Amino acid sequence: MSIKIKTNEEIALMRDAGKIVAETHLLLESMIKPGISTFELDEAARKFILKNNAIPSFKDYNGYPGNICTSINEEVVHGIPSKKRILKEGDIISVDIGAYYKGFHGDAARTHGVGKISEEARNLIDVTRQSFFEGLKVIKEGNHLHEISSAIQNYVEKNGYSVVRDLVGHGVGRDLHEEPQIPNYKTIGRGPKLLKGMVIAVEPMINIGRYEVRWLSDDWTVVTMDGSLSAHYENTILVTEDGSELLTL
Ligand code: MF3
Ligand code: CO
């Protein structure tokens, strides 16, 4: 396997897939308030994606039971929507959505506050989102993957938070997860060179406390080991000659 370069025709389809993901996010954002269940969010996303002639990417992926992922407070990613999980004032929730349209996936995540949230929670959400944009700044043809990882980690740690190590971003296209893996922290080497036509999903997962995580017994939900709050932000990105294009924003 190697990193795929998308053709112009493929990129046009990925823009469409990404737009569906972005619009689904706007719909769910408008629904997030105290009292709503994560199942209701999942249902709304499923219906909206199907109405747009796409399919939820995550459903049945390696047996994943939901259509989207909804991860509350100390849950990092891959929380499974449930009628029993009711959002309450002060929670933070990461919503992760994928849509498969005409052979291609779009993938994006956002973290929202429910009602009024603490200053600390607000700052975590803001730093997580901004860390993505710090990574985005160094994306262009000719740069190396490692520069994205470093930019994210430096920004996050400067702000006193920690970067999850056990989960990473990824290439995206005909498959939800393609090469390369994209860590949000420095690793050995420069990583592959970015070339125009690559499409990648950069997705920092940031904890207030320590970076270690564990898996719950449902085999999906990832939580922080120390119980601290965690936030997540992700977009699908096309690498271009002089920068990048966000396909899910
Ligand atoms: N955005 C996440 C990812 O890239 C969502 C995957 S959830 C899964 O890993 F269920 F599909 F695995
Ligand atoms: Co992803």
Image: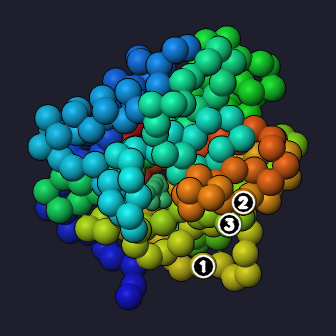
What kind of element bears circle 3?
A: loop
Q: Earlier in the sequence, mark 1 or mark 2?
A: 1
Mark 2–mark 3 contact, CB under 8 Å? Answer: no
Q: Is residue 50 visible?
A: yes
Q: CA distance from mark 1 to mark 2?
A: 27 Å
Q: State whether residue 208 is above or below residue 114.
A: below
Q: Position of residue 54 (x, y in %)?
A: 18, 47
The three-letter amino acid code for the residue at tag 1 is: Gly
Q: Position of residue 235 (x, y in %)?
A: 45, 47
Q: CA distance from mark 1 to mark 3?
A: 18 Å
Would residue 213 be found to the left or right of residue 220 on screen?
right
Task: Indicate the quadrant where residue 169 lies.
Answer: bottom right
Residue ID at (39%, 68%): 62
Q: CA distance from mark 2 to mark 3?
A: 9 Å
Residue ID at (60%, 44%): 232
Check mark 1 vs ligand 2: CB closer than 8 Å? yes or no.
Answer: no
Residue at the spot of label 2? 214
Task: Indicate the quadrant where residue 208 lies.
Answer: top right
Residue at the spot of label 1? 191
| Furthest residue in direction bottom, as rendered | 1
Residue ID at (85%, 49%): 226
Would residue 208 be found to the left or right of residue 19 on screen?
right
**Residue 166 — which label?**
3
What kind of element bears circle 2?
A: strand
Q: Which residue is more in the foreground, 246 or 74?
A: 74
Q: State whether residue 248 is above or below residue 31.
A: below
The three-letter amino acid code for the residue at tag 3 is: Asp
Q: Given this view, does label 2 or label 3 mark the residue nearer the observer?
A: 2
Q: State whether residue 187 is above or below residue 156.
A: below
The three-letter amino acid code for the residue at tag 2 is: Arg
User: Which quadrant would the N terminus be assigned to in this image?
Assistant: bottom left
Q: Earlier in the sequence, mark 2 or mark 3?
A: 3
